[in-house]
Image (cartoon, rainbow, N blue to C red):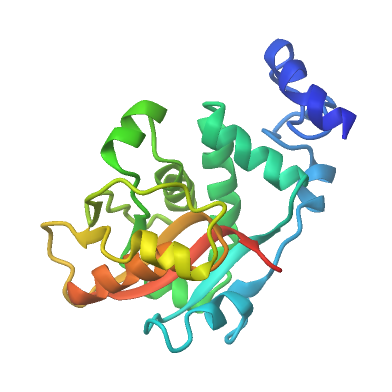
Amino acid sequence: MLSGLLSPLVHLFFPHCCEVCGNDLPAGHEILCFRCRQALPLTRFHLYAGNPVENIFTGRVPIQQATATYYYSQSSALQQLIHRFKYKQRKDIATYLGRQTGYLLQESPWMTTIDAIVPVPLFPAREKKRGYNQAALLADGIAQITGTPVYTRALLRQQYTDTQTRKGRTGRWANVATVFRAGNMPLQGKHLLLTDDVITTGATTEACSHALIAAGARVSICCLAFAYH
């Protein structure tokens, strides 16, 4: 816990230190040392049909595939990393974790059928205030490894919504059910990989999927982290 609290301060003065433990990074490493990267809890869902993320959407929206890279839990190293790239301007962490996701997705036969990656959009005013969309950074990281194009205008958020953090499944769905629409670009017949940071109830990704499917696309889902209960 102490190392996690000290890490942002250590990184400020010693930028070649691991974001989690604060130790020096060996040559060729970035963001995380080998030990801390290996300690992040991989789900391996990208290799298995009927995994817990896919099951979230059963009977709700006809997606093709669904996965999440890591398990998410409170007060974990992963939570610290996500907090830093969402709220502390650490865009490099999001892109790095996107690349780690990209390496895993290359193991999935279905990834070769993906035509483009679509990040879950932020409301424009929120993105302007933050300066970036963290889902788009994750998508960029995936694209750097897989070579898949990123469509940042394929999906639009047309109204502001309150944070989803403290809402249950019903509240989350009511919060986002009519928020998203497909952009003005041809999506008919394309297989799109929808990306976001954390999936809990799946309300946001479900609403996004409905909008893309209504535009004629097929949709698969890849989130960085799965918040299991």
Q: Does residue 191 lie above or below 76 as drawn?
A: below
Q: Residue at x 49, y 53 (%)?
A: 164
Residue at point 68%, 33% (across, down):
31
Residue 186, image x, y percentages: 12, 65
State the residue in front, 131 or 143: 131
Question: Relative to residue 155, is residue 100 drawn left or right?
Answer: right
Residue at 26% in and 59% down: 180
Q: In the depicted view, which residue is nearer to us: 117 or 164? A: 164
- Nearest the viewer among 174 and 186 is 174
The N terminus lies in which quarter of the figure? top right
Residue 16 visible from this viewpoint = yes
Q: Check the image and report above or below for 17 versus 174.
A: above
Q: Vertically, is 47 above or below 137?
A: below
Q: Residue at x 37, y 54 (%)?
A: 120
Task: Answer with the quarter of the image where residue 211 lies.
Answer: bottom left
Residue 185 image point, x, y percent? 12, 59
Front one among 20 and 175? 175
Which quadrant does the C terminus fall into? bottom right
